Image (cartoon, rainbow, N blue to C red):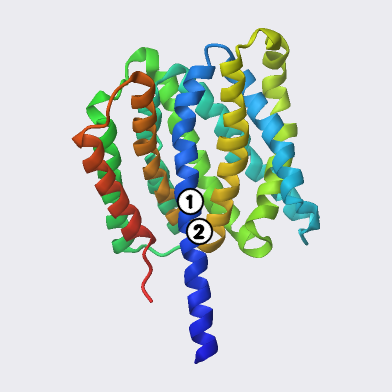
Amino acid sequence: MIETALSQELQARRVLRALVALALAQVVFGIWPVVGKLVLPYLPARALVGTRVCLAGPLLFFATRPWRSAMTRREVFSCAWLSLLGVVANQALFIEGLARSTPINAAVLGCLIPCYTLLIAVVLRQERYDPRRMVGVLLALAGALWLVGAERLDFGVDRLWGNLALCANTLLYSFYLVLSRPLVAKHGALAVTGWTFGWSALEVLPFSLPALLLVDWRALPIGVWGGIAYIVLGASVAAYLLNAYGLRFVSASTVAVFVYLQPLVTGVAAGRVLGLRPGWQVLTAAGLIFCGVAVTAWRRK
């Protein structure tokens, strides 16, 4: 009995740490669209993708040391496919979409991730349909849409391709969350993240190398270099490690639902940049988002 109680307490602590890590990851991710929008006038989208992945990939690879895991050759090559979904194509579509669309659109369309993830996980029979968790998803979605204002979405012709790229980005990331979970459960989140980002540095080169060679790196302002450092070290290395840790202890759809914190962070960050103060809409939306996350993450004992 005592051993069982201690085991349950240890598991509860691990889940709590995982939820805190997921929340911190969303703070970092939420600031990233605002920083990216400021960097894009100086660094083309393909060059920014290459810079982020080529620098973050090796850093994460050597930080996690995935070669120490017991992965088979087949599993290592499976990480290459996961890399295309969750890193290379995902980031290429997001940054290309951000360049052609707006941070508001990116925040709203990012709310599709939990819906896609839950659907994919149920279809692939990794998770059971749970009405309670669906209520949490819908509650958080309502908060996210209320925060950014769905009526403010710009779906004009000039934004069409950017919005489509952002939609595709969310779909690929949802597949990544679901398909990576078996490997994460077997070998650990750090090993999978390390191999995934290790592959990404190689896979992104054909897409981004021509753009990287055209950039006049010496002419970039110091502020842009600071933005690049944040994107690489914060929104890539730190955020993915935090997300990977969370995926180790909670379900894929629970990880995905934390994306609803991103519009809140993005709205506050964009407000700071624009000199706007968060109003009652932000506070109300924050309450809905946190309630939705709590309902979805809560587990019956």
The crowd level at tag 2 (other Cα within 10 Å; few <14, some 14-19, many 20+) is many
Which residue occupies 30% across, 47% down?
Answer: 289
Residue under label 1: 22
Residue under label 2: 18
Which residue occupies 80% across, 53% down?
Answer: 67
Residue 43, image quadrant: top right
The kind of residue tagged 1 is Leu
The crowd level at tag 1 (other Cα within 10 Å; few <14, some 14-19, many 20+) is many
On residue 39, the disc is none
In this view, which residue lies farthest toward the bottom? 1
Q: Nearer the viewer, residue 184 or 26?
A: 26
In what element is the residue under mark 2? helix
- Up/down of 73 relative to 163, above or below: below
Which residue occupies 39% across, 19% down?
Answer: 160
- Up/down of 217 relative to 294, above or below: above
The x, y position of residue 263, in whole percent, is: 36, 36
Q: Nearer the viewer, residue 207 or 250?
A: 250
Whether residue 154 appears in this view of the structure is yes
- Up/down of 42 relative to 183, above or below: above
Cβ atoms at labels 1 and 2 below 8 Å apart: yes
In what element is the residue under mark 1? helix
Measure the C-alpha gap from mark 1 to mark 2.
6 Å
Residue 202, image quadrant: top right
Q: Nearer the viewer, residue 67 or 168?
A: 67
The x, y position of residue 114, in whole percent, is: 40, 48
The kind of residue tagged 2 is Ala
